[in-house]
């Protein structure tokens, strides 16, 4: 089966009546968890970005609390999983401020994690890579926001 382009899908969706459109969205949500999460964000959470961020922060704290600390290998796998999850949420939002705030929170959690991430080169590299990404993304924001977020980033070290 040949997959249609976004333009083709857009023109086809314009011709579909509303009731059928609802059914198509429901069918789409049945196939992948990500599709359902994106629809949930767009329908319920996109109106209140602050509560969306708070929910993700709460989930992140819980995930960091569940990390198996018996070896750095397991810690690294869990941290990568948490970061992948956060980046998925960032893709849903498409808001640069949300992205920076969530990545800063992730770095804060890593920084305060016990055992220290400095005991593992891989974990420390993940941390440094994300701080570099935050610095790059800060340049796209308004100067006032840049200053505020840069101060938070400097506190991390």
Image: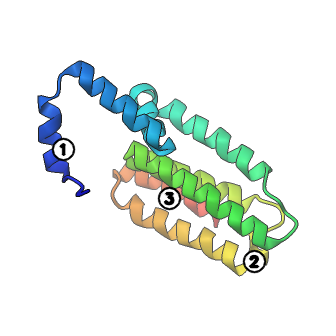
Residue under label 2, please give it. 120
Q: Position of residue 57 (x, y in %)?
A: 62, 42
Name the residue at 38% across, 37% down. Answer: 28
Which is more foreground, mark 3 or mark 1?
1
Residue 108 appears in the rendering: yes
Q: Position of residue 26 (x, y in %)?
A: 39, 29
Q: Judge left or right: residue 72 versus residue 4.
A: right
Q: Earlier in the sequence, mark 3 or mark 2?
A: 2
Q: Residue furthest right?
A: 70
Q: Secondary structure at mark 3?
A: helix
Q: Earlier in the sequence, mark 3 or mark 1?
A: 1
In the rendered view, tell whether residue 145 sits above or below residue 47: below
Location of residue 46 (image quadrant): top left
Numbered label attached to residue 9: 1
Name the residue at 59% across, 36% down. Answer: 54
Question: Toward the viewer: 3 or 84?
Answer: 3
In the rendered view, tell whether residue 132 sits above or below residue 38: below
Numbered label attached to residue 150: 3
Location of residue 103 (image quadrant): bottom right
Q: Judge left or right: residue 136 versus residue 19.
A: right
Q: Position of residue 101 (x, y in %)?
A: 52, 49
Name the residue at 70% across, 80% down. Answer: 121
Q: Residue furthest bottom?
A: 121
Q: CA distance from mark 3 to mark 2?
A: 26 Å
Q: Residues within 10 Å of mark 1 (few under 14, many from 20)?
A: few
Question: Toward the viewer: 95 or 144?
Answer: 95
């Amino acid at each position: 089966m040949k997959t249609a382009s976004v333009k083709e899908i857009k023109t086809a969706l314009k011709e579909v009546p509303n009731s059928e459109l609802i059914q198509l969205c429901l069918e789409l949500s049945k196939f992948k968890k990500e599709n359902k999460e994106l629809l949930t964000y767009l329908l319920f959470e996109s109106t209140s970005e602050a509560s969306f961020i708070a929910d993700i922060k709460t989930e992140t704290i819980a995930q960091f609390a569940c990390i198996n600390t018996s070896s750095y290998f397991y810690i690294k796998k869990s941290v990568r999983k948490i970061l992948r999850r956060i980046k998925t949420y960032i893709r849903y939002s498409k808001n640069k401020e949300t992205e920076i705030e969530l990545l800063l929170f992730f770095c804060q959690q890593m920084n305060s994690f016990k055992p220290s991430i400095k005991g593992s080169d891989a974990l420390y590299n993940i941390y440094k890579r994300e701080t570099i990404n935050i610095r790059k993304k800060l340049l796209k924001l308004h100067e006032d926001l840049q200053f505020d977020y840069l101060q938070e980033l400097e506190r991390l070290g």
